[in-house]
Image (spheres, rainbow, N blue to C red):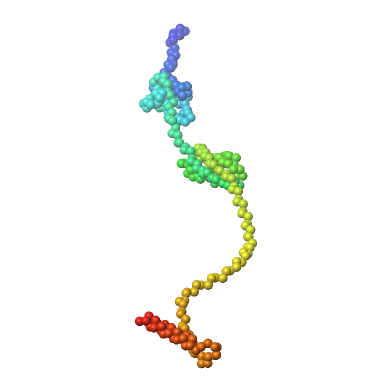
């Protein structure tokens, strides 16, 4: 500038503004931050110390991977960081990776049904057979009774008993068993003792004499004619002597004839 007073020129410095660019950071469709960067510099290498990378954003169920000019994050060559040179205004996007979810398998609860007689006692925990979990192993001790189904061992019927168990990962298994109460059998009535009849003596029967055995018939024996001996002294009966001799002669003749008959039979 020329000074008319002393006819001299006064030189004033002229400041030239350096070129700068803006980087816009987007997160899930919304503007997250804006940072100014010197031409050809990176955010970490320029002279503007008040301008720096924003804090990493977050998203439930995901892990923040980084920033990229590719909104999908598939093109690895377009990733952006604090060391990336900036040559113009640009927009970058937050890229996330889905967290690997560990599947927590629910435990297996096994129960058994039971039948009791009316009035009998039962421990409902005896219905539990086992509780096993793929991650936690045997967790039978953690099984809890959640509903006794109005169980009453004095009333005939079926009762649904429910149990549940929860593993360390929070997965729960529920199962039910049935307790059946049957009617108590009526004890049988003992039979009345039978009266022992008094024996009545039977009247004695008169024994009839046994008939005599039949005797074998004996052959008739012919009577031997007795020889008549003449009386030495015949009484005087008034009968003559001649008839006596005649009778004696007939007897002798009959005896002789019998002897001859026997003699012939022998021969």
Tell me residue 9's x, y (percent).
43, 10
Left or right placement of residue 162 versus residue 66 in this view = right
At 50% from the left edge and 37% from the top edge, which residue is drawn? Answer: 171
Front residue of 17/220: it is 220
Tell me residue 263's x, y (percent).
38, 83
Image quarter (top left, top right, bottom left or bottom right) of the C terminus: bottom left
Image label count:
0
Q: What is the residue that sits farthest to the bottom in this orientation?
A: 232
Tell me residue 69's x, y (percent).
40, 23
Q: What is the residue that sits farthest to the top in this orientation?
A: 4
Front residue of 219/237: it is 237
Front residue of 64/142: it is 142
At 50% from the left edge and 41% from the top edge, which residue is drawn? Answer: 109
Tell me residue 54's x, y (percent).
47, 26
Q: What is the residue that sits farthest to the left in this orientation?
A: 267
Front residue of 137/219: it is 219
At 61% from the left edge and 66% from the top edge, which residue is drawn? Answer: 204
Residue 254 at least partly seen: yes
Residue 41 at least partly seen: no
At 52% from the left edge and 44% from the top edge, which residue is drawn? Answer: 113
Location of residue 200 with respect to 51 vertically, above or below: below
Image quarter (top left, top right, bottom left or bottom right) of the N terminus: top left
Location of residue 136 with respect to 100 vertically, above or below: below
Q: Residue 162 sits in which quadrant?
A: top right
């Amino acid at each position: 500038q020329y000074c008319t007073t002393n006819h001299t020129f006064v030189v004033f410095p002229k400041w030239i503004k350096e070129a700068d660019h803006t980087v816009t950071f987007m997160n899930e469709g919304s503007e997250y931050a804006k940072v100014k960067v010197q031409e050809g510099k990176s955010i970490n290498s320029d002279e503007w110390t008040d301008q720096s990378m924003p804090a990493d954003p977050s998203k439930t169920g995901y892990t923040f991977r980084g920033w990229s000019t590719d909104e999908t994050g598939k093109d690895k060559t377009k990733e952006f960081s604090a060391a990336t040179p900036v040559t113009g205004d640009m927009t970058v996007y937050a890229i996330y990776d889905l967290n690997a979810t560990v599947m927590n398998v629910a435990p297996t609860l096994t129960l058994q049904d039971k039948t009791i007689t009316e009035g009998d006692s039962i421990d409902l925990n005896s219905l539990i057979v086992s509780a096993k979990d793929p991650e936690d192993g045997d967790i039978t001790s953690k099984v809890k009774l959640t509903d006794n189904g109005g169980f009453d061992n004095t009333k005939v019927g079926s009762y649904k008993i429910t149990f549940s168990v929860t593993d360390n990962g929070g997965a729960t298994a529920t199962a039910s068993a049935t307790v059946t109460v049957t009617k108590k059998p009526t004890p049988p009535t003992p039979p009345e003792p039978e009266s022992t009849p008094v024996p009545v003596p039977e009247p004695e029967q008169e024994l009839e004499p046994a008939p005599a055995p039949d005797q074998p018939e004996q052959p008739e024996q012919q009577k031997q004619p007795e020889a008549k001996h003449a009386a030495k002294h015949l009484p005087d009966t008034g009968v003559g002597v001649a008839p006596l001799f005649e009778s004696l002669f007939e007897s002798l003749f009959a005896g002789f004839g019998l002897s001859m008959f026997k003699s012939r039979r022998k021969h």
